[in-house]
């Protein structure tokens, strides 16, 4: 069974994978020359590469929200079975979110985002309630 801190580390790896997938998609459409350049000329990607780019930004935002909640709970020594469940829900939701976004599974993507966000809110509320 993972701890909340291990789940945070696993999610960090998922975000790194998302960055890699987005970069590969951009490489296919824009080429290595553009990616190695200073990118003074703005170019955009289309299709799955564009969705992966948006998913990457969303995943980084989710990490920015999730990490402090887990670290706050750790600092307060406030981990409980409920916080572990919330962290697992967050991770599962984010694992579902990435392919759902990449492949345009709109309803599932929205549900996964909402579940992950709600789990993060639960972690913050638990940290605030712990004294």
Image (tube, rainbow, N blue to C red):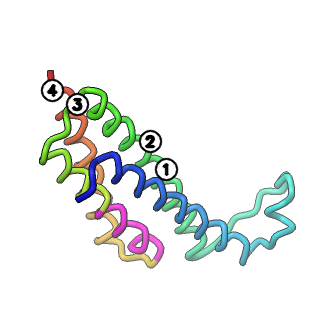
Secondary structure found at label 1: helix
- Check residue 77 in the rendering and tell me which mark sits there, or answer none: 3
What range of the chain is rendered magenta?
A: 92-102
- Check residue 64 in the rendering and tell me which mark sits there, or answer none: 2
Secondary structure found at label 4: loop
In the rendered image, residue 54, in percent from the top left (x then y), is placed at 52, 60
Nearer to us in this view, 85 or 26:
85
Chain-order first, disc 2 or disc 4: 2
Chain-order first, disc 1 or disc 4: 1
| Residue 100 as seen in the image, left or right of residue 53 | left
**Circle 4 crowding by C-alpha within 10 Å: few under 14, some 14–19, many from 20:** few
| Residue 90 as seen in the image, left or right of residue 12 | left
Q: Are marks 2 and 1 in contact (CB under 8 Å)?
A: yes
Q: Main secondary structure of the magenta part?
A: helix
In the rendered image, residue 32, in percent from the top left (x then y), is placed at 82, 70
Q: Are marks 3 and 4 in contact (CB under 8 Å)?
A: no
User: Whole-Å distance between the Cαs marked 1 and 4?
Assistant: 27 Å
Residue shown at 37% from the left, 35% from the top: 68
User: Whole-Å distance between the Cαs marked 3 and 4?
Assistant: 9 Å
Quadrant housing the C terminus: top left
Chain-order first, disc 3 or disc 1: 1
Residue 67, image quadrant: top left
**Circle 3 crowding by C-alpha within 10 Å: few under 14, some 14–19, many from 20:** few
Residue 88, image quadrant: bottom left
Label 1, on which residue? 60
């Amino acid at each position: 069974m993972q701890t909340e801190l291990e789940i945070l580390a696993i999610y960090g790896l998922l975000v790194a994978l998302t960055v890699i997938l987005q970069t590969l998609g951009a490489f296919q459409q824009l080429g290595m020359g553009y990616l190695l350049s200073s990118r003074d000329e703005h170019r955009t990607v289309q299709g799955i590469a564009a969705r992966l780019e948006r998913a990457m930004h969303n995943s980084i935002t989710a990490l920015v929200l999730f990490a402090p909640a887990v670290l706050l709970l750790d600092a307060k020594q406030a981990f409980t079975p409920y916080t572990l469940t919330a962290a697992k829900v967050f991770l599962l939701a984010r694992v579902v979110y990435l392919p759902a976004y990449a492949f345009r599974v709109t309803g599932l993507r929205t549900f996964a985002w909402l579940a992950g966000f709600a789990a993060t809110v639960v972690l913050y509320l638990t940290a605030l309630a712990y004294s």
